[in-house]
Image (spheres, helix red, strand yellow):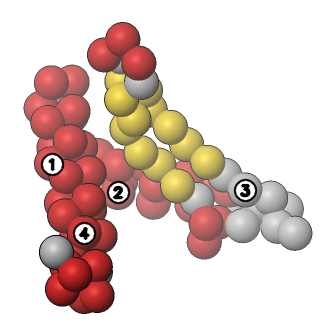
Amino acid sequence: MILNSLFGHNKSKDEAKRRLTLVLAYERKGLPPNFIERLRDDLVCVFSKYSQFDVNRIEVDIKKEREGFEELWISIPFKQ
């Protein structure tokens, strides 16, 4: 248990769980496996035309909300 916390294995476990959740969400929605990456790349292309946005920090994810609903979550931050 102590070794896991020292070497960050909990982070790896959490990341693996998040990725598995995404794969399952893709399958349920009929989305291609690389949907999130492609969508993020498209958003970067569009928002890079505007200097107000920090395109390096664009985030795209599928999040499971309460009551079993899944949502497409997109964050496009402004530059500070």
Give the alpha-carbon distance from disc 3 to disc 2, as whole Å.
Answer: 17 Å
Question: Residue shown at 18%/86% (left/top)?
Answer: 3
Quadrant (top left/top right/bottom left/bottom right) for the C terminus: bottom right
Mark on residue 37? 2
Give the CA separation, mark 3 to mark 4. Answer: 28 Å
Q: Which residue is mark 3?
A: 77
Viewer-nearest of discs 2 and 4: 4
- Tell me the kind of residue under disc 3: Pro
**Left or right for 70, reference 59:** left
Q: Looking at the image, is mark 2 or mark 1 earlier in the sequence?
A: 1
Q: Residues within 10 Å of mark 1 (few under 14, many from 20)?
A: few
Q: CA distance from mark 4 to mark 1?
A: 15 Å
Q: Which comes sooner in the sequence, label 4 or label 1?
A: 4
Give residue 65's quadrant in the image.
Answer: top left
Q: Nearer the viewer, residue 23 or 40?
A: 23
| Lower position in the chain sequence, tag 3 or tag 2 | 2
Residue 47 shows in this picture: yes
Q: Disc 3 or 1, which lies upstream in sequence? A: 1
Q: Pick out the residue farthest to the top.
A: 67
Q: Which residue is mark 1?
A: 20
- In the image, is 77 to the left or to the right of 32? right
Q: Secondary structure at mark 4?
A: helix
Helix, strand or loop status at disc 1: helix
Q: Quadrant of residue 2?
A: bottom left
Mark nearer the N terminus (2 vs 4): 4
Residue 52, relative to residue 35: is it above or below?
below
Residue 21 position within the rendered picture, expressed as x and y whole percent measured from the top left: 20, 42
Q: Which residue is mark 4?
A: 10
Element type at mark 3: loop
